[in-house]
Amino acid sequence: MAASLNEIYKLVGELRGTVEAVKSGIGEIKDDMAASEVASSNSRQNMHHRLDDIVMRTTHLESDMSSTKHKLDSMEKVTVEVTTLRTKAQGAGTLGRWLIRFGIGIVTLAGWLIGAYTWMTGRPPP
């Protein structure tokens, strides 16, 4: 059976409509993919920007920690010096106390000697 010319035109029209629908569907898919690619690119750009910010913050933190470490080291040197001076002062204080006791002993001994000389000779020392 031979199809009539009208049926052939009808089938060609349907085929043409289907091809147009597929073509528009492919166009929409391409548009969606392009939009998705732009969104992905923006997302990656944003992620790189945030990563750069984190690197900068980390660098600043490392710099601040290094500065704090140097300050702490210098404070430690001062603390060691103060501790050394305190120890020396305590030692000097101990020496001073012994010298004072020794001096008091010498003055006491001199007083006894003067008293003994005066008692033995009956006159004060020259």
Image (cartoon, rainbow, N blue to C red):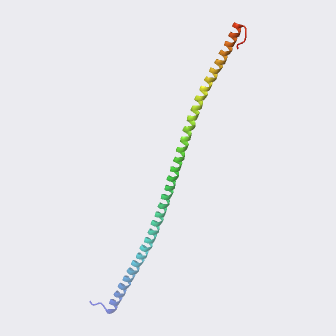
Count of numbered labels shown in the rendering: 0
Q: Residue reaching furthest left?
A: 1
Q: Residue at x 73, y 10 (%)?
A: 123
Q: Quadrant of residue 10 in the image?
A: bottom left
The residue at the far bottom in this view is: 5
Question: For this view, does 90 lie left or right of residue 54?
Answer: right
- Residue 72 location, x and y as percent? 54, 45
Residue at image coords 58%, 33%: 86
Closest to the observer: 120 or 38?
120
Q: Is residue 87 above or below residue 24?
A: above
Outermost residue on the right side: it is: 123
Q: Residue 83 placed where, x, y %? A: 56, 35
Left or right for 6, reference 28: left
Query: The N terminus appears in which quarter of the rendering?
Result: bottom left
Q: The C terminus appears in which quarter of the rendering?
A: top right
The image quadrant that residue 95 belongs to is: top right
Q: Is residue 2 left or right of residue 49?
A: left
Residue 94: x and y in percent read: 60, 26
Residue 113 x/y as whole percent: 66, 12
Q: Residue at x 48, y 61 (%)?
A: 52
Task: Give me the residue at 64% from left, 18% from top.
Answer: 106
Residue 46 lies, with reference to residue 125, above or below; the image says below
100 or 87, nearer to the observer: 100
29 above or below 102?
below
Q: Does 48 sit above or below residue 88?
A: below
